[in-house]
Structure formats: C-alpha cells, structure tokens
Image (cartoon, rainbow, N blue to C red):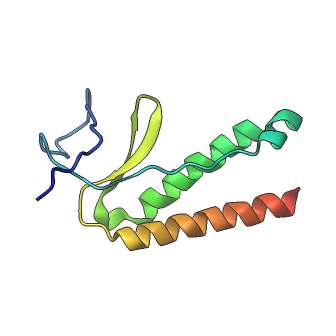
Amino acid sequence: MKDKKYPVLYATNLMGTLYKHCSIHPTVYFNIRLNEDMLKSDEDYQSYMEQIIDECYVNIVNKFTFSQALKVTNNKIPFIIFRGNVDKGMVKQFCRTLLDEVSYKSKSCC
C-alpha cells in the first residue's frame, strides 16, 4: 500500500465535536476563474463574482445535507468538508452543473 499524502487542516476552533482527531474526510475546493478583461473594465465584476462563488458553496452544502457537508475556511481559502459518506461522482456532476449555469448566465447578461 502506497503512502498517500493529504492536505492538512489544523482546526483552531470548531463548535461541537464534529470531527475526530487525525481523521480523514473528503473535501471539495470550488473556485471560478475570473475574466481578466472584465476585471479591468467593470469595477463591480469582482464583488459580483465573489458573491456568486459564495452562493455556489451554499448550494453545494445544501445539496449534500445527508453527507453532513460543512463550509470551512482555512487560511482565507474556503472549502467544503464532508463528515458522512459522499458520492464523489455526484459532487463532480453538481459542480459542473453549477459552472455551466454560471457560464450561461454570465454570457447572456453581457
């Protein structure tokens, strides 16, 4: 068996006892690359896209409630950690759907 390396989350303060010491849980990092041209030309674009990314995290957490998803921020980088079993294929498909929807809506408004 190969030794797998995992990213480490050092929790300094978590409410309740959700996670055991040295436990390994599936995580998701979700981000959208910003359009550099729009950043230069539209002053509201960055704040709008930050709002959209935050709403994507909320949608992922709400979609996978049975997997006990929780949004956690570590070093100002948000990600979602799942306590229960989660189907990785379903998570990937849902993230693709979110990205397609954001792409469609952002193209139709400009």
Task: Judge whether 15 appears above or below 35 on screen.
Answer: above
The picture places residue 106, in percent across and down from the top left corner, at 78, 58
The C terminus lies in quadrant: bottom right
Furthest-front residue in this view: 2
Residue at (56% x, 67% y) in the render: 96
All told, the count of numbered labels is 0
Please identify the quarter of the rendering in which residue 5 is found: top left
Q: Is residue 1 left or right of residue 71?
A: left
Task: Judge whether 63 appears above or below 106 on screen.
Answer: below
Task: Judge whether 75 appears above or below 67 on screen.
Answer: above
Residue at (13% x, 44% y) in the render: 20
The picture places residue 8, in percent across and down from the top left corner, at 27, 37
Please identify the quarter of the rendering in which residue 102 is found: bottom right
The picture places residue 34, in percent across and down from the top left corner, at 70, 44
The N terminus lies in quadrant: bottom left
Residue at (47% x, 30% y) in the render: 76
Q: Nearer the viewer, residue 36 or 23?
A: 36
Residue at (47% x, 59% y) in the render: 60
Please identify the quarter of the rendering in which residue 75 is found: top left
The picture places residue 98, in percent across and down from the top left corner, at 59, 64
